[in-house]
Image (cartoon, rainbow, N blue to C red):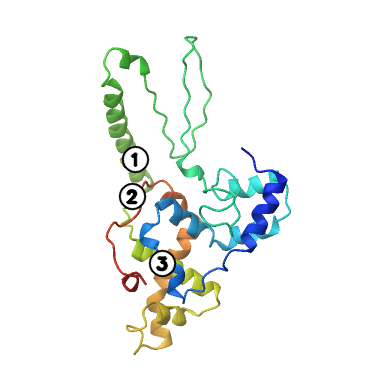
Amino acid sequence: MPITENEENNSTDDMKKKLPRPNGKDINRYKGMEKWSYRKWAWEFLRRNNDFILACKKCEVGTDDEKQAIANQFGLLRFKDYRDPYTGSYGKPKFTSDLLTSWSNQNGDRSSKSIELEQGMVLVRFDLNASFIDTQSLDKQLQLAKGRLKKRLKEYSEKLNKKTVTHHHSFKTFGIYIRLLDLLANRKTYAECARDIEPIKSADKTKEELSENIKQRIKKAREYTTHGYRFLALHPGKPGEKVITLGEIL
């Protein structure tokens, strides 16, 4: 259901009452991260994307079409302002990355579809009629499709000379990334970020060493704000089930 103009204005007013963005130093603002779902992590990274923040600010009094254009640009099914928390006035964010497109013929008439496949896309056809003969046929088709997709992926990765990537997601690591982004937004230098994140390890290092040590983490943190969040939204559940103390997280 679309948000009405009055609801939109109320959403903006509600957001203005929210706490300001964390500054990266007050660890009390980061409690409960171990409970965050992948979808919440995706939203927390996106709402720290500088381009997304700027687009939302420019569109505070924009039309529905302008706001939907922002949603489309940043992989959201519908617009949600960056200041809105995960379960805020706009509702939970919905991402296009987990949108599955399908077509079916249930009328009995022979039909055809003109589908344009972009590079890297694969089209797989399933036959539901087989389930009326054997209920396990759909599972079998899914297994076959999975095997075929893996084969296509192998061929495609060899053609592009690229390797697939496996991520070992950890809310400890994500927590550090979020804090780094907030520290940078608070105009902290790389060296200052390193000292705030790891004060003990940073005690005897120069500014140059600190900057070099934290550079890769900052690069990864920014990557999650620009495109990595789209893939986090695909994952069910939450990263890392181990309960650890806030001190270990941050």
| Dot in front, 1 or 3 | 3
Q: Position of residue 104 (x, y in %)?
A: 46, 21
Q: In screen coordinates, is 76 left or right of 42?
A: right
Q: Considering the numbered disc 3 on the image, is that residue within a helix, a strand or a loop?
A: loop
Evaluate if marks 1 and 3 touch, with contact meaning CB atoms under 8 Å apart.
no
The answer to whether 202 is drawn above or below residue 128 in the figure is below
Circle 3 residues within 10 Å: few <14, some 14–19, many ≥20 = few
Q: In this view, does 103 lie above or below 225?
A: above
Secondary structure under the numbered disc 2 in the rendered image: loop
Q: In which quarter of the image is residue 27?
A: bottom left
Q: Which of marks 2 and 1 is nearer the N terminus?
A: 1
Which residue is identified by label 2? 164
Residue name at image x 67 percent, y 53 percent: 10
Q: Position of residue 250 (x, y in %)?
A: 37, 72
| Label ID, residue 153 | 1
The N terminus appears in which quarter of the rendering? top right
Q: Residue at x 59, y 45 (%)?
A: 72
Sequence-earlier tag: 1 or 3: 3
Looking at the image, which is closer to me, 93 or 189?
Answer: 93
Q: Which amino acid does label 3 sit on?
A: Lys
Q: Is residue 151 visible?
A: yes
Dot 3 and dot 2 residues touching (CB under 8 Å): no
Give me the C-alpha separation between circle 2 and circle 1.
9 Å
In front of the other: 36 or 76? 36
Judging by the rendered image, the residue that carries numbered circle 3 is 31
Where residue 30 sits, quadrant-wise, is: bottom left
Task: Mark 1: give few (<14), some (14-19) or many (20+) Cα within 10 Å.
Answer: some
Instruction: Identify the residue shown where x is 55% and y is 46%.
Output: 76
| Residue 103 located left or right of residue 6 | left
Front-most of residues 11 and 46: 11
Q: Nearer the viewer, mark 3 or mark 2?
A: 3
Callout 2–callout 1 Cβ contact below 8 Å: yes
